[in-house]
Image: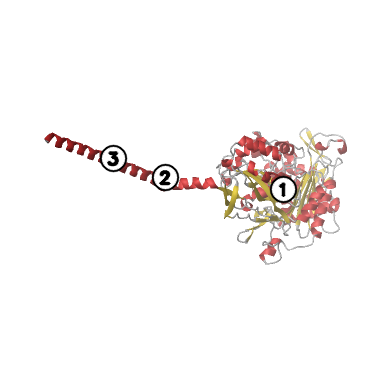
Amino acid sequence: MMVTTHSSESEFGDLHRRLFILRVGLLLVVVLLGLRLWHLQIYEGPYYRDLSENNRTRLVLLEPARGLIYDRHGVLLANNVPSFSLYVTLEDVKDREVLIRQLADLLGLDPTIVRKKMAVKGSKLLPRKIKDRMTLRDATLVESRRLDMPGVMIQVESQRNYPGGMTAAHLLGYVGEISADQLEKPEFLDLHQGSIVGQYGVEKSYDRHMRGTSGQKSVEVDALGHEKKASVVERPQAGNDLYLTIDVRLQKVAEDLLGQEQGAIVALDPNSGDILAMASRPGFDPNMLSRELTPKQWVEIVQDEGRPLNNRASQGQYPPGSIFKIPMAVAALETKTVSPSSTVFCNGGYQFGKRLYHDWKASGHGYVDLHNALVHSCDVYFYTIGQRMGIDVMAEFGKDFGLGKATGVELPSERSGIMPSTAWKQKAKNEQWLPGETISAAIGQGYVTVTPLQMASLVGTVANDGVSYRPRLVQAVMDRTSGNLQELPAVPRGKINAKPETFRLIKDALADVVTKGTATKAKSSLVTIGGKTGTAQVAALRTGPEENIPKKFRDHAWFVAFAPVESPKIAVVVLAEHMGHGGSSAAPLAKEVIETYMKLTPQVPAVTSNLTGGNGPGHSSKDS
């Protein structure tokens, strides 16, 4: 009996231990399951919630309407029109190559470009823009095949439009899809593939003001990525509007006057620096460049010998020729190199060492003082005073007039030209300045180069008795959100350190240039005009009549002017490339611009109208 009892107790204890181990095991399993559930639902809950949400929703960015651009009187220069854009969400695409072939066959797209756009860095959940400015036919084709192309969607967006076509193209510029290189730059960190940014002109300079802020919508999709329902999460904010200083009526006249010739015309208000017109030819259609171009189309544009994308007014650099005699005359009077009555004898040439520097008039001008030297553009007079002053004195006064440095106009890639000096040549060429180079520089040749905009500013400074303003292209910015109009002030650049008498003498001479000097073709019965002709040599040692010389080697024609002489309101520069003499080719064009401006119907600037509560363009019904 004792053995049996002991055996029973042993079996009972073993069973008890097994039950205890089982209970502990079950408890550990429950604890582990609880910990796992906590980890999945609490610790990693947001991650799996987002993952689950993205299985049924997609985030689509809504592009904003770009700000509008007006001229000084509220005439619309750039607006937006509705258009269709094609997007692809890579997360929903099963086979990219198959989709690429489908889109290429359906829409005639270049597979290489489509592949490149799909490969741009970014979240696979954000749609990639593949094509914009689609036609209604193309959009309909895509919609009809969308079930066969998961991840493909059509968005209605606003696209940039320039109602005037080529009018003011170099000022307005154009827009385009942001490039991969631009996406890496700090100023574009808040943008994404497919964003539209300014690529040229004020579209580029004021891009941050005009591009607005993207919105977003949540799109519910099925298992194949097909859109089922959409809701707007955040609406896009339109960009701000710009009011330019130009008068589009005068702008069109300036462009028409240049016609098919290469050149530039700039007109500005000398009392404020406001640019009234800035024409450059040949031009381009910003509507075409704001669309996506094929590589072949782009190469054709940039390799065009006429360089249509070059704004000759602010980027073209040319010898100023005899226009440079204006700051030379100021320098000569202020340094007392000559007095107003001092004379120089011109027999048609200036001998320096073994070289004879010719005057444009082979028979010479005889004895000339400063007044007549300007009126008849006597080269020998300025050869003489230039040699007396030296290049560094000339450079000092040239820089006072803004030569050799950018004007600061609100346009990208403005060129500065060259105002040479002994220090400049040592730095740029690692060579010493030669005395003979001073003689060439004295009449605006040699190393001296300027832009037409610099010359317009120069003659405006003279017309304004030495007070200089930075050329201004943007008059005001309208905040589309608040409706506040911020007017941008004129920016004085300083005053030329010269006596009032000096400017009176110069202006009297420039008035006589038009009435009885080298620019009689600029004489007007409507308004008094003062000006100076210039002929900039392109190629040296030419022989024979001008008409027998290939056009690309002919001289550039310059003319700068201001009017009315007694109270200047407009300053104009005309540069006609390879058109010969300024008096015959450029002066009549300046006269037309000035007369047009004087005859234009006075209008209250849109900025003033809005500030005073007048009838400016209504912002509640703007084209967006």
| Point 68% across, 41% down: residue | 420
x, y percent for residue 478: 64, 58
Residue carrying label 2 = 40
In this view, the residue farthest toward the top is: 354
| Comparing labels 2 and 1, the label whose residue is closer to the camera | 2
Residue carrying label 3 = 22
Amino acid type assigned to the residue bearing label 1 in the image: Leu
Q: Secondary structure at mark 1?
A: helix
Colour setup of the view? secondary structure
x, y percent for residue 144: 68, 45
Q: Secondary structure at mark 3?
A: helix
Instruction: Tell me the tag on residue 136.
Output: 1
Location of residue 72 (image quadrant): bottom right
x, y percent for residue 449: 72, 42
First-in-chain label (3 vs 1)? 3
x, y percent for residue 206: 64, 51
Task: Quarter of the image for the N terminus: give it.
Answer: top left
Amino acid type assigned to the residue bearing label 3 in the image: Leu
Residue in the foreground of this view, choosing between 219 and 454: 219
First-in-chain label (2 vs 3)? 3
Packing grade of label 1 (10 A; few <14, some 14-19, many >=20) is few
